[in-house]
Image (tube, rainbow, N blue to C red):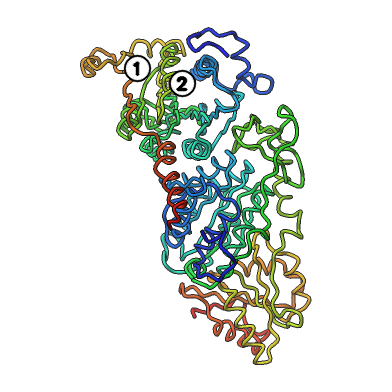
């Protein structure tokens, strides 16, 4: 097994790295339904989980997969499912349930072209908003976007850590390019990894409340079969899990909100590259950030002071780093493989109205290249101020 | 704990299974079959001597979905139709737990129909109790997948034209290894069949025919809850292999109750997973295989 091997360089695909990261994080249950381009994750775990006494089950659809994941998590297993856009849509019902019932679990969405069946074998970043607002109601959303095979490994572990700590469903937004790309990686020594497990309750069993009113949102959690008998429900509930009064409803939703907005330090994961003296900021996440990083290098060679801001955690959105950038740069370019989902979030935080936010929206299902980003930056730079909002390029 | 054959256990035992301090009175209409069913279920738990800490009661949405709220064990009130998916996760993750799922007819075979047949196909050791009142009671009596042809509902004002499912036949066809039907009227039979279903290793289905006199009964002029209980009595005929179903139906006995199928030979899913997946995988690993 690779996770216990000495730290030798190995060749891995992003999807395989997700599976190995989940194993390193202590996953003991996987339920899923086959879907391109995520299936390798299931295939690796179908082999590896039984070896460590874990459970793998292929369910009848993604709704059922997500239900089984929540059930297994309540029974005390760290649980995972992986899917792509169409399956992710089906899972939304239970993602909302997991958020409401505060059940830790991790959902991997290897994004492909949409809407509907879309482009099963091509890449996209069009599920960013679905990761945030996909289920009905106001619920805390956590989503990580890896940009390399190594990050598929490390951010999967991070996803498990967040889910266990905050008792939330956490989404890993990979995409077809990251999932199927093979890279030479040196996985970190398992002994150096930070692994967070859900906090066990310490109070006497009869005092146990499954949903204590803690505004920090981090509550100990007992599992089924441990002697703490509690009620779990998708209904809005008070701290024992029974139907809530209107004051308790507000308190619960407040608690959900606080999961996102407290703990800002831990929940801001944003990488800066060449941003110290940058006059132009490229804001990119996931696979597109790879091209953007290369574009920054090319632009720097041309004497253009560009920098890259790359959120690893897109939800909650990295508010502070983006606000700071508005005091520093002339314009922000948001290249992405959708019609502008991240750009709108960046625009929403605009503190300096002189700083323009521009898009590079490639919709032809082919990976954005560094050259396209460079070209777009130079184009905006020449025409600075005179160009209309949100240019769209078809590559 | 009570002796397994003692059906009239001390009331204090039964009450210890209820979350009486918080949740009563229950929310069901006076006369509803669910109160009777809850009583029967608790009697079975007490008679069987189950451990509250190792029993998981799971439900979907609807009137039947409220059952777990009142039972003092591990309880899980899931999304509409999805109870069996959560139950599959719980059972597979911790096979030592006793998992009982309560669903209504719409819950089990309309929105949850896919999960129902697949849980039956896997033969996972879960007991599914389907309370069939032929209607969506909580939303006001709309027609369900078990509403008989011609019966009226707010969404079938001229009479239902959707042919109904026979839940037990569906379960048999999908591979459930224990299938039985009872009614609220036949509560002693429900007691016996539920006891047997819980002891059965594999996916067991118990359909309990109930009545909804406040919506289905009122719209179709079927009388009070007592009248509807009498109808359950009058229409019921106990299944035996010799029973001529067509003849009984011609005589107005169209509700076949009793044990319809029991197959103890088919392997159970969690056992199979342990035996055919976990053990070979670990053996292979110990041999240094891939």
As drawn, is A267 to the left or to the right of B50? Answer: right
The residues tagged by marks 2 and 1 sit, at their Cα atoms, a distance apart of 22 Å
As drawn, is B222 to the left or to the right of A300? Answer: left
Q: Quadrant of the C terminus of chain B?
A: bottom left
**Quarter residue A251 falls in:** top right
- At 66% from the left and 75% from the top, the residue drawn is A357
Residue at disc 2, secondary structure: loop
Q: In which quarter of the image is the N terminus of chain B?
A: top right
- Label located before the other in sequence (2 or 1): 2
Q: Which residue was labeled with disc 2?
A: B212
As drawn, is B126 to the left or to the right of B42? Answer: left
Q: In this view, does A367 lie above or below B94?
A: below
**Marking on residue B258:** 1
- The residue mark sitting in front, 2 or 1, is 1
Residue at disc 1, secondary structure: strand
Instruction: Confirm whether circles 2 and 1 share one chain.
Output: yes
The x and y percentages for residue A4 are 57, 59
- At 64% from the left and 87% from the top, the residue drawn is A299
- At 56% from the left and 62% from the top, the residue drawn is A5
**Quarter residue A155 falls in:** bottom right
User: In terms of depth relative to the viewer, which is nearer, A270 or B198?
Assistant: B198
**What chain does badge 1 belong to?**
B
Q: How many labels does the image show?
A: 2
The x and y percentages for residue B57 are 54, 28
**Marking on residue A60:** none
The x and y percentages for residue B43 are 52, 14
User: In terms of depth relative to the viewer, which is nearer, B156 or B92?
Assistant: B92
């Amino acid at each position: 097994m690779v996770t216990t091997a000495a730290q030798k360089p190995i060749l891995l695909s992003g999807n395989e790295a997700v599976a190995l990261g989940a194993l390193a994080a202590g996953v003991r249950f996987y339920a899923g339904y086959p879907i391109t381009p995520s299936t390798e994750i299931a295939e690796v775990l179908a082999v590896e989980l039984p070896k460590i006494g874990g459970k793998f089950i292929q369910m009848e659809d993604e709704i059922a997969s997500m239900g089984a994941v929540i059930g297994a998590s309540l029974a005390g297993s760290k649980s995972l499912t992986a899917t792509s856009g169409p399956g992710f849509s089906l899972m939304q019902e239970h993602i909302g349930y997991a958020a409401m019932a505060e059940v830790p679990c991790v959902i991997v969405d290897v994004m492909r072209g949409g809407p509907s069946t879309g482009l099963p074998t091509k890449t996209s970043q069009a599920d960013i908003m679905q990761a945030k607002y996909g289920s009905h109601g106001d619920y805390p959303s956590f989503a990580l976007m890896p940009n390399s095979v190594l990050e598929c490994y490390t951010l999967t572990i991070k996803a498990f850590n967040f889910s266990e700590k905050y008792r939330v469903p956490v989404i890993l937004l990979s995409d077809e390019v990251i999932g199927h790309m093979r890279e030479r990686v040196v996985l970190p020594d398992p002994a150096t990894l930070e692994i967070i497990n859900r906090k066990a309750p310490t109070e006497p069993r009869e005092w146990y409340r499954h949903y204590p009113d803690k505004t920090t949102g981090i509550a100990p959690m007992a599992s089924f079969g441990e002697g703490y008998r509690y009620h779990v429900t998708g209904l809005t509930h008070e701290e024992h899990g029974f139907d809530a009064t209107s004051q308790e409803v507000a308190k619960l939703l407040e608690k959900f909100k606080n999961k996102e907005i407290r703990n800002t330090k831990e929940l801001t994961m944003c990488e800066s590259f060449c941003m110290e003296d940058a006059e132009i900021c490229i804001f990119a996440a996931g696979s597109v950030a790879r091209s953007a990083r290369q574009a920054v290098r090319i632009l720097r060679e041309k004497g253009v002071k560009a920098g890259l801001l790359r959120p690893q955690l897109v939800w909650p959105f990295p508010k502070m780093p983006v606000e700071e950038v508005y005091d520093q740069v002339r314009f922000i370019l948001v290249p992405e493989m959708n019609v502008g989902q991240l750009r709108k979030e960046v625009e929403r935080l605009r503190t300096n109205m002189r700083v323009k936010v521009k898009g590079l929206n490639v919709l032809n299902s082919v990976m954005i290249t560094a050259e396209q980003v460079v070209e777009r930056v130079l184009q905006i730079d020449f025409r600075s101020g005179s160009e209309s909002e949100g240019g769209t390029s078809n590559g | 704990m009570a002796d397994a054959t003692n059906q009239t256990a001390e009331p204090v035992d039964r009450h210890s299974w209820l979350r009486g301090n918080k949740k009563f009175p229950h929310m069901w209409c006076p006369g509803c079959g669910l109160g009777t069913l809850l009583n029967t279920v608790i009697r079975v738990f007490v008679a069987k001597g189950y451990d509250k800490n190792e029993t998981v009661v799971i439900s979907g949405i609807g009137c039947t979905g409220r059952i777990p709220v009142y039972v003092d064990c591990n309880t899980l009130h899931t999304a509409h139709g999805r109870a069996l998916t959560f139950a599959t996760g719980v059972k597979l993750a911790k096979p030592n737990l006793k998992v009982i799922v309560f669903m209504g007819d719409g819950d089990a075979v309309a929105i949850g129909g896919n999960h129902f047949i697949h849980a039956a196909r896997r033969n996972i050791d879960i007991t599914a109790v389907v309370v069939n009142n032929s209607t969506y009671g909580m939303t006001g009596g709309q027609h369900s997948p078990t509403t008989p042809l011609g019966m009226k509902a707010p969404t079938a004002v001229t009479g239902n034209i959707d042919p109904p499912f026979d839940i037990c036949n569906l379960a048999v066809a999908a591979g459930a290894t224990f299938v039985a039907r009872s009614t609220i009227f036949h509560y002693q039979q429900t007691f016996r069949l539920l006891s047997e279903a819980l002891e059965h290793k594999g996916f067991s289905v118990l359909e309990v025919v109930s009545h909804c006199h406040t919506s289905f009964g009122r719209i179709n002029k079927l009388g009070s809850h007592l009248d509807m209980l009498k109808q359950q009595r009058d229409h019921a005929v106990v299944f035996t292999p010799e029973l001529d179903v067509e003849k009984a139906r011609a005589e107005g006995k169209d509700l076949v109750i009793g044990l319809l199928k029991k197959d103890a030979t088919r392997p159970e899913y969690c056992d199979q997973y342990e035996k055919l997946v976990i053990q070979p995988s670990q053996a292979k690993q110990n041999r240094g295989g891939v």
